[in-house]
Amino acid sequence: MKIAGNLTAASWATRAAELRKSSTPELWRQTIQQYLDGRLHPRYLQPIGEMEKLNKFQGEGFSVVTIQCALIEFLAALREGVKYKREKPDPNNHEYSGSKKLFVKFLGTVPPFSTSIGAEAEGFYDDVRCGLLHEGQTKNRWLIKKRDGKCPATVISAGPQKTLYWSALQCEIMGYLSGYRIALENDAGLQAAFLRKYDHLAS
């Protein structure tokens, strides 16, 4: 089973053992490039980039945001090192069943999302994430648009009719990933969470 590019579950077992034995920044940099970037780029970031090139303004933003929501939940679970279990999750075994709490906590407390989305995190989950994934539409008058321009830019415009700018959200995601990669080289808590999550992916 491939979990990142051409890297397999077996190769992860070897790397995880190396990391647990000698957790150096150099080995983590290599792991980030191979296992984090090797998973995120082909599965999430490259498809988003291809859709961004379309620039047709015919609704492709719905597809982009659907992928972004899946990516956000993965990044939230990765940061905490938790795995989804639908029935009777055991928090002591790093399991969760309700994605809303994880999703909203991540957007509401972790920079840069906490500043740009924090106050709207619950509405974003209910009306955008769940609306798109379960009903193929946004709810409660939320709109999805692209906003051209340099980062940073407004991600959500508030008001009776809220607008999510998916291009600005992508800037935030890329900014988060840049900081996360750097922190992961030396942060023991993030490293332990990463190991737990990838052990689960490889299982």
Image (tube, grey):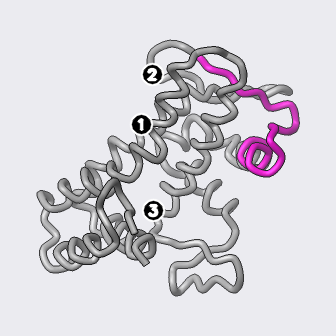
Residue in the picture at 44% in, 61% down? 79
Q: Which amino acid is tagged 3? A: Leu
Query: Relative to residue 193, is residue 27 drawn left or right?
Result: left
Instruction: Decide: is 191 above or below 13.
Output: above
Mark 3 or mark 1: whose residue is earlier in sequence: 3
**Can you identify the residue that label 1 sits on?**
174
- Give the Cα separation between the discs numbered 3 and 1: 16 Å
Between 114 and 155, the one nearer to me in the picture: 155
Q: Residues within 10 Å of mark 3 (few under 14, many from 20)?
A: many
Contact (CB < 8 A) between labels 1 and 2? yes
In magenta, the rendered stretch is: 127-147
**Can you identify the residue that label 2 sits on?**
151
**Quarter occupied by residue 84:** bottom right
Mark 3 or mark 2: whose residue is earlier in sequence: 3
In which quadrant will I find the N terminus? Answer: bottom left
Residue in the picture at 58% in, 15% down? 55
Q: Which amino acid is tagged 1? A: Met
Secondary structure at badge 1 equals helix
**Can you identify the residue that label 3 sits on?**
78
Query: Relative to residue 47, is residue 89 drawn left or right?
Result: right
Instruction: Decide: is 198 above or below 28.
Output: below
Contact (CB < 8 A) between labels 3 and 2? no
Rendered location of residue 182, percent (x, y): 26, 48
Secondary structure at badge 2 equals loop
Q: Residues within 10 Å of mark 1 (few under 14, many from 20)?
A: few
- Give the Cα separation between the discs numbered 1 and 2: 10 Å
User: Is residue 108 something one can see in this rendering?
Assistant: no
Query: Relative to residue 180, is residue 170 drawn left or right?
Result: right
Of marks 3 and 2, the one in the foreground: 3
